[in-house]
Image: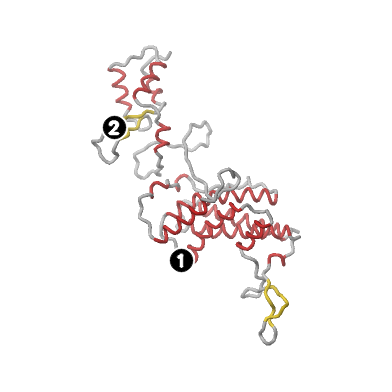
Amino acid sequence: MKSRSNELLEKSIAAMVSAIEIYNKPDFLYREETFSVLAVNSWELLFKAKWLKESSNKINSICVYEPKLKKDGTKSKKQAIKQTRSGNPFTHSLDYLAKKLIEKGFLDNIVWLNIQAILEIRDSSIHFYNRFGLFSIRLQEVGSATLKNYVSLINDWFGKDLSQYNFYLMPLSFMTIRSSVDAVILNKEERNFISYVESLESCQNESNDKFAVTVNIDVKFTRSKAKDALSVKVTKDTDATPIRLTEEQIREKFPWDYDDLTKECRKRYKDFKVVRKYHELRKQFLAEQRLCTTRRLDPNNPKSSKKDFFSPDILNEFDKHYVKL
């Protein structure tokens, strides 16, 4: 027979897996709100499982007590378990258990700060509603951190390996770069929320790589020979899933300017010369988005001065026209 602690642990894992599965659905309009509700539920069940484990599985250890009422309606010195509307035991809240676990040295305060960010999203969802996209952006960061923290604590507290589950959020198609909303005018509620999460982040210790308040999402494309590797290609198809690259990522993909490209060609080919043939081929390859990108001094001005940058992959095309050393 399973202990109460293990029963709550299994319920906690089920709640977190459900949160992830719902968030990762391709078309789910209440994605962030549902994730936050289930994630908070999962954390509370986990904290109760841990508290029961440390209390010899005594159910009374997680119950709230209150003074008994005398026949005349006054409060007695004797305590009794507080009851819910249906008469069941009323248990301690997530906040109470978190503080107790921190006091006992079981819980890192960074984990609690992360949960508070999830709680803010949950409370806004349940008691009012979220009408702006900033929750979805921040939840990617807060949610990724909460999964990282959750998996670590499950292992530390119960020695349980969760590698059988896909504990990750944000499929590539859901990702949004934060800079895309930097210019949005925020209302009071939005500013309050952003300020609150930033205040939690400011308490994060960079040297603590085990737990985090938020986790930044960074996407990089590398060649892979794996059969199940994700295929990505540059296209002008307006129906394709958009992927936005930062300036740093663009320069990483297209690191060579004209001088760099010319130098690499000289090193690679025995019959290479900077003559018309080279210039015509280079201009021909400029039309290939996977091989070249053009950066303008003023992106909004088509007449602005510009500079071309090349991917190392362009050498594969030059190989067809020159003899390698």
**What number of labels is visible?**
2
Residue 239 in the figure: left or right of residue 19: left
Give the label, 1 or 2, closer to the camera. Answer: 2
Task: Indicate the amino acid at tag 2.
Answer: Lys
Percent coordinates x, y for residue 310 in the rendering = 37, 28
Q: Check the image and report above or below for 242 versus 118.
A: above
The residue shown at (57%, 59%) is 40
Task: Indicate the amino acid at tag 1.
Answer: Phe
Q: Helix or strand or loop: what does disc 2 sit on?
A: strand
Q: Check the image and report above or below for 60 versus 77.
A: above
Q: Quadrant of residue 246?
A: top left
The residue shown at (42%, 46%) is 177
Percent coordinates x, y for residue 301 in the rendering = 25, 39
Q: Quadrant of residue 49?
A: bottom right
Q: Check the image and report above or below for 237 versus 309.
A: below
Frontmost residue, 213 versus 218 = 213
For the C terminus, which image quadrant?
Answer: top left
Residue 120 in the figure: left or right of residue 82: left
Frontmost residue, 315 versus 209 = 209
The residue indicated by pointer 1 is: 128
Q: Quadrant of residue 64?
A: bottom right
Badge 1 or badge 2: first in the primary sequence: 1
Do the residues under discs 1 and 2 have CB atoms within 8 angstroms? no
Q: Which mark is residue 306?
A: 2
Percent coordinates x, y for residue 86 in the rendering = 63, 75
